[in-house]
Amino acid sequence: MRSERYKWIALSNTTLGVLMAVLDSTIMLIALPDIFRGIHINPLQPGNSFYLLWMILSFMIVSSVLVVGLGRLGDMFGRVRMYNLGFAIYTFFSLLLTITWMSGKAAAIYLVVMRVFQGVGAAFLIANSAAILTDAFPENQRGMALGINQIAGLAGSFIGLVLGGVLAPIEWRLIFLVSVPIGLFGTVWAYLKLHEVGQRRKNAHVDWWGNLVFAIGLVAIMVGITYGIQPYGGSTMGWQSPFVLSCLAGGVGLMVAFAFIEPRVREPMFRLGLFRIRAFTAGSLSTLLASIGRGGLMFMLIIWLQGIWLPMHGYDFARTPLWAGIYMLPLTAGFILAGPASGILSDRFGSRPFASGGMLLAALSFALLELLPVNFGYVPFSLLLLLNGLAMGAFAAPNRAGVMNSLPPEHRGVGSGMNSTFQNAAQVLSIGVFFTLMIVGLAATLPGALYHGLVAQHVPAAAAYRAAHLPPVSTLFAAFLGYSPVQHLLGASVVAHLPAASRAVVTGRSFFPGLISAPFKNGLRAAFDFSIIACLVAAAASWLRGGRYVYQGSRGQSQHDMALAGAEEVVLGQAQSGA
């Protein structure tokens, strides 16, 4: 039974949970140089890219794989119970991440494993928070509630960048330790104050085969994407690697098998019947496309700032990670401003105009960013970031509310998990797509520009040739981690033997950004074009959701029959087709 006081408690606690879960997915990005220095390992040495990539992606991949299954468990055993368990797991492994006593590769493996289990706790939180809110709030307030919750998650991804940049230089363990007291508070608060108000299906069964096939298939695809952006043999990328091709082919094959398994299982993991609900299908497709369009772009914008713009404006390479996070804050401000407002308005006017309009506005912002010169003025850049944040915020909350309103009450957990899977998996896919586009753009012109620029500063031709033909991803990672790129590309011994004047030039703040600007612009243009297309298709998919639908069911059907039949949503009164 809903109460006025309880719904605000549910909103406060779940917003805190989602904020912390998403914040931890990005707090490590800016802190990576300090972490690797702290455990005494160079992430840019050959063979160490494994640790670099998996410290970033393990958390995201685990969350993507588990959210559907954990949402399903919430439907069966209680969403609040699963959510509370998630808060406890998340807090426990955040504590374990702070007490690393090893160094070198052993410490790196330990951190990756602990990040995996921290991601399990985060998946519990993400999978059940939206369902808890949908149960707690009436349909005319869900857009507002889900908007605040959703925007907390989006904002957390950028707050993590700044927080990591502030805490890591003091002590790298602080980026994990900061989650412990907040996690303890959230765990106790959730245990004492949250209670079940939604429908449960106690006699349901877990689809073990479906969960296993889905998990292995999705992990295989994500592993293939992760290693596809790394060099292989003499190629700048690994898309021709037998390992990558095997992962992708095997993963896709398992996903096809999963689609055949699910309709034949008594209690399927993926409720494929939910896709007969037009609002759910359109909203989930929009989520997928929007996440593909923006997920990897955050990396590109950070590299743009760290590798080019900030050094050109006098910032030392070691300080660029923190300042990149700070200069990205207008994007967060846009999320925070637009999210709750669009959620409240969507409660009155429906999700479609705000979700579709947000995607169209996002496409416009990407087109305008593409027109900026590489060495832009910060004011127009910040205004375009704000516009993009407003656009994404306008889309996220109404779209999520439209998806959750369309679901039968007893399947809100699995439906929320399915939607979160589309979002999280698309972000990993997006990183692969954007890095691929960027590397293709760099590979065409970077070697020549880098070789001639180095030779002009008296770098020996053999050393210049070797540096110019290193994989472009190595250069991107060097800039992304705040290392001096030329120092990394040439090696300390080569730099030390240069004439003093040449050494000052090549290690200066403007030399490398000046060389990479034109090649980087080529790759960035392709990335922006991809984002524009993804956002336009997402806007069209969102528009196809129809009017303002809220699932109410049919008294003549059992809950199980309604779910299997797809049970078309019933409008509040009538479908407002123009909403």
Image (spheres, rainbow, N blue to C red):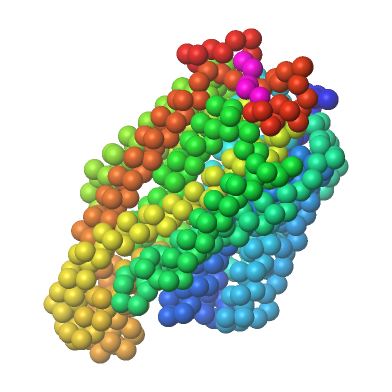
Would residue 57 appear left or right of 431 to someone viewing this image? right
Magenta stretch: includes residue 570: yes
Q: Identify the residue at the far top of this view.
A: 573
Vertical arrangement, residue 407 with respect to residue 203, above or below: above
Would residue 376 appear left or right of 34 to someone viewing this image? left
- Count of all numbered marks drawn on residues in the image: 0
Quarter holding residue 320: bottom left
Percent x, y for residue 444? 21, 64
Percent x, y for residue 482? 41, 67
Percent x, y for residue 428? 49, 54
Along the line of sight, which residue is nearer the eye, 21 or 241?
241
Range covered by the magenta-colored residues: 567-571
Residue 136 at least partly seen: no
Q: Which residue is at a point 46% across and 71% down the rendered structure image? A: 243
Vertical arrangement, residue 5 with respect to residue 383, above or below: above
Percent x, y for residue 249? 47, 61
Quarter holding residue 197: top right
Magenta residues: mostly which secondary structure? loop
Q: Which residue is at a point 59% across and 27% down the rendered structure image? A: 277
Q: Which residue is at a point 61% across and 69% down the rendered structure image? A: 112
Along the line of sight, which residue is nearer the eye, 490 or 574?
574
Would residue 519 appear left or right of 487 to someone viewing this image? left
Magenta stretch: includes residue 431: no
Residue 523 at least partly seen: yes
Q: Which quadrant of the rendered structure holds the N terminus? A: top right
Q: Which residue is at a point 46% across and 49% down the rendered structure image? A: 295
